[in-house]
Image (cartoon, rainbow, N blue to C red):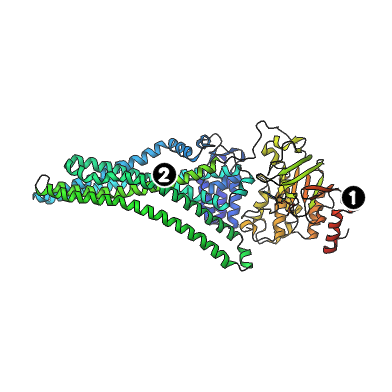
Amino acid sequence: MSGWAHESERLRAAGPGQRTRRALKRARLWYALHPRSAQAAGLRQVCYNLFRPECFWFRNGAACCPHQAYDRFITGQRACRKGGPAIGREADGANPRQLLAGFVRSHLFAYGVGTGAIIASEFVIVQFPHLLGRFTDALSAGQLTPRAVGVYAARLAAVGLLYVLLFGVGQFSNGRLGREFEYELRQRLFSHWETLSTAYYHQRSVGDLLNQALNDVRTVREAMAAGLNQLTNAVFLLCSTLWMTLRTVDVRLTLASMFPLLFVPVFVVAFGPRIRQSSRQVQERLSDMADLTEESLTAIRLIKATGNEPVEARRFAERVEAIVAQQMQVFQQSALFQSLIPLMGSLSFAVALVYGGALTATRQIGIGEFVAFTQYLGMMLNPLQQIGNVINNFQRASASLLRLEVLLAERPDITDPPAPVLVEDIRGAVAVHVPEFRYPGSERPVLRDVHFEVAPGQTVGIVGRTGSGKTTLVNLLPRIFDPPPGTVFIDGHDVRDLRLSDLRGAIAYVPQDGFLFSTTIGENIAFAREGVKREEVEQAARLACIDEDIARFPDGYDTVIGERGVTLSGGQRQRTAIARALLKDAPILILDDSLSAVDMNTEKRIIEHLRALRGRRTTFIVAHRLSAVRDADLILVLDEGRVVERGTHEALLAQGGIYAAMYALQAAGEGVSA
Ligand SMILES: Nc1ncnc2c1ncn2[C@@H]1O[C@H](COP(=O)(O)OP(=O)(O)OP(=O)(O)O)[C@@H](O)[C@H]1O
């Protein structure tokens, strides 16, 4: 049995009670090793089946479908069962600082273990100079026997071993917690992004959002894992060293040598805010660069086709130069700040040599005491340097937290109404009475006096010049943009009074770009609904006339179609998106210019299939090619946001207006018979 088949069998054999983390971990490993292979896709399907839709909830309290549960699991996010620990629930709506505080509170014991281990390790390591001092004293007094040397060596080795053990435990424990927090924060970000409305994404770039999800979150994680370790290490190493010196070394020598170190807090106050400010600017410029990279890679085919590589390379270089300049500023400030701290350490050393040397020469302290003290001072330099690093880290993390805070404070402008009308079954009657619609922040009305009504099961064609408002009009139905109150109704209910999940669940929408995911074509179609069977996917593909194309693909429905469906033709992409919408089987179907890249014959067949389903769903077809709407019960002709003509195909032809002129033009150009 092949590796894949064996794994698949094991997973299948696991009963509901055995859907264990172990099985899933193995699945994740398998998936990581074979991310793009058909086997992985198949295994994924099996794994989907292992999750039951009703029982997977995430820590932020949001329910999710098994597909998402699995996807989140393989990307390292943790799902928990309904009713499981709801750490994130209290964090819902919280800012990252509260999230951080909540996380630390709920992992107090683990933090205690990690930090405690580091603290203990510091108290162990400071025994080292003390032992060395005693060894030196014994040596200078000529009291060292071979046995005593062995005992000293064994003690020093034991100190080293215990230190490594304790310090390792502390590092690992806090590092692990940092990673867990990183996942929770990313998950929180993602859940938050899912709630924000389309208008928000028109204002923010993908690059900037990616930068926040990656760089800002990582900076915070570094501060709370490595930063916390370094801080604990540095503070307690300093404290324990100080304690040992005061206990075992002359107090005058200790106090005099420590004097230069009192300047460290002064430098922190002087440099901290400047470093934080510059770090924030660097992050913003990094967002810019991420933006440009994303845009350039998305448009790489166009760039190559037009031979614009040098222009893009120049644009990229300009942004990189700006980032480098900004980063140099941060580096200069950080370098100056970090070097001032060891400088103070060196001054301490100088005082110790002069004053300690004099005390030793006048026999006020022993040689062993002096040797031990210089060792202690050496040990202090490292934590002082670390404190500089940690403060820099915390300054950067603070800037990142601020950016994340701003993002998480963003509220979706399209939300459920406070008291939604609960509807059992939407039939698909649509009434639109929009006196005027403007996009948020825009002065110009895009729709004016648009009034029409559609009975359930009817088909509406929407045509008109480019920019006349067709997409805007259909976007109002699922509230992608909010219509004015009391202007758009479904089954007699204002769409703004319905729960968003009810409203959007009743609408299958194929947007103009018909986005596809970089997975298999079968999964792209199945994305419409949870728990769909392969036969249903195939039936939807038949209705959208993509089934024959799929049959010719090397792996059929399991063919991976590349990023955003790059390996498909424009027409194939459109038909896949249509199949996905048909599979949703919602009472309202919207095709926004979704047949433009399909040839006339295929378009005709798809329209025939839709007509066969007539009565079952209300359909809106936005089109430039009039052949796509000629069978519609009502055709609206838009011009500059107004309905300038309306009627059936025949009635509009008879009117001899804009529609008739468009039809004549297209018939002449494409050879369409009237
Ligand atoms: N998010 C937006 N913010 C502001 N104005 C917008 C936005 N989206 C579209 N518009 C403007 O609204 C007008 C109508 O756009 P819309 O996309 O609805 O036209 P359309 O008829 O669907 O065009 P096409 O046939 O080219 O797709 C255009 O002038 C456009 O510039």
Instruction: Find residue 38 and report its image quarter.
Output: bottom right
* Residue 176, percent from left and from top: 42, 45
Mark 2 residue type:
Met
Q: On screen, 152 above or below 424?
A: below
Circle 2 packing at 10 Å, graded few (<14), some (14-19), many (20+), is many
Q: 462 or 20, which lies in front?
A: 462
* Residue 45, percent from left and from top: 61, 49
> Which mark, residue 79?
none
Q: Report the Cα–Cα distance between label 2 and label 1.
A: 70 Å
Badge 1 residue CB within 8 Å of ligand 1? no
> Which mark, residue 651?
1
User: Where's the N terminus, which quadrant?
Assistant: bottom right
| Camera-nearest label, 2 or 1 | 1
**In the figure, is residue 36 to the left or right of 158?**
right
Q: 628 or 505, which lies in front?
A: 628
- At mark 2, the secondary structure is helix
Q: Check contact, mark 2 vs mark 1: CB within 8 A.
A: no
**In the figure, is residue 664 to the left or right of 83?**
right
Mark 1 residue type:
Ala
* Residue 293, percent from left and from top: 55, 58
* Residue 46, percent from left and from top: 60, 48
**In the figure, is residue 582 to the left or right of 267?**
right
What residue is drawn where x is 74% and y is 49%? 469
- Seen as rendered, the residue at the extreme bottom is 307
Q: On screen, 605 above or below 427?
A: below
What residue is drawn where x is 46% and y is 43%? 181
> Which mark, residue 224?
2
- Whether residue 160 is visible here, answered yes or no, is no
**In the figure, is residue 503 to the left or right of 110?**
right
Circle 1 packing at 10 Å, graded few (<14), some (14-19), many (20+), is some
